Amino acid sequence: MAMSVRDVASAAGVSVGTVSNVLNRPEKVSPTTVARVLAAIEDLGFVRNDAARQLRAGRSRSIGLVVLDVRNPFFTDVARGAEDRAAEDNLAVLLGNSDQNSVRERSYLDHFEEQRVRGVLISPLDDDLPALERIRARGIPVVLVDREAGDQSFSSVSVDDVVGGYLAAKHLLDIGRRRLAFVGGPEAIRQVSDRYEGAAKAVAEVEDAALERIGTDALSVLEGRAAGEAIIARDPADRPDAVFAANDLLAMGLLQALTMMRDVRVPGDIALIGYDDIDFASAAVVPLSSIRQPAALIGYTAVQLLLKETEGESTEHEHIVFQPELVIRASTAG
């Protein structure tokens, strides 16, 4: 049976108020009494209900974070950065994985609202943000992670994905490739559409270059492998000579499919570049070129913005945009 504060007070021979002071304001209690109350807590195995205490105070020590895909090391690094900043203020980060599913995304938002978290960080699936507006209207600040709101109605921390897509495609063009393919989806994910837009801009600058789009249902290794197998199934003359994958997980799957075919050389026949620069990119059988994002810094900065809003230090929405970086490895530098 769970012990209560009243049980601790009875065992220590003090009032309930004294136990409360020992737990929350020990400097107001004599050392002898503190020792007696702590001994009673130890003997009874009492564990205080911090959640209830925080709800009564209207002040949670938790932040909710919803990411698109927890299997993607990019979002793992974002979460690590968020945890590092939250820990500086003795806060905890509660992680939710939407798995690129709108129903799951709403479920996590409802859960965080019920828990009255101090704020929510989210990498949303699309621009339909009424659930976020509802949470904010109830006093829970929201910061977008790895993207901006179309109308800039929420604070955000992101990377310029249009520039990133441009850098990736321009690199492929600079090494002499002209038949480019962009692999990625769903298109509703803003990061995907922005990366394609940047690639299309780069291709439009080269008269004899072309860009085709190969859609995927998710940003995963399996989807990348399926796209790679579809490319291999074509006549060699109809294959692209370079592929830009919307993230490194897709690129890893593409690389698996391409390297399984002994008559397809990477980068000799098909150059390949990904996005995010996850740790696995440099360790691939053919080390992957990629567009680097400062993942941990994104998470750290997002918590920083969120805390400024919760403390009333910021009355305007802030939008921090980091610049991506081209990282060249063997998959495009053969």
Image (cartoon, grey):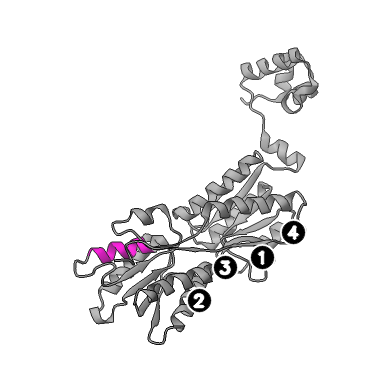
What's the distance in space between the residues labelled 2 and 4, CA to CA? 33 Å
Describe residue 255's horizontal placement relative to residue 90 as left or right: left
Residue 194 lies in the magenta stretch: no
Q: Which residue is mark 3?
A: 126
Q: Find residue 190 and report its horizontal and vertical position in percent.
A: 54, 69
In the rendered structure, find residue 197 and report the number of the disc placed on it.
2
232 vs 139: above or below: below
Amino acid type indicated by mark 1: Pro
Is label 4 in contact with label 1 (beta carbons under 8 Å)? no
Residue 252 lies in the magenta stretch: yes
Local SS, label 2: helix
Residue segment shown in magenta: 251-260
Which residue appears at 37% of the width and 64% of the height?
251
Disc with the residue nearer the chain's start (4 vs 3): 3
Amino acid type indicated by mark 2: Glu
Q: Find residue 60 and report its horizontal and vertical position in percent.
A: 69, 43
In the rendered structure, find residue 130 and report the number of the disc placed on it.
1
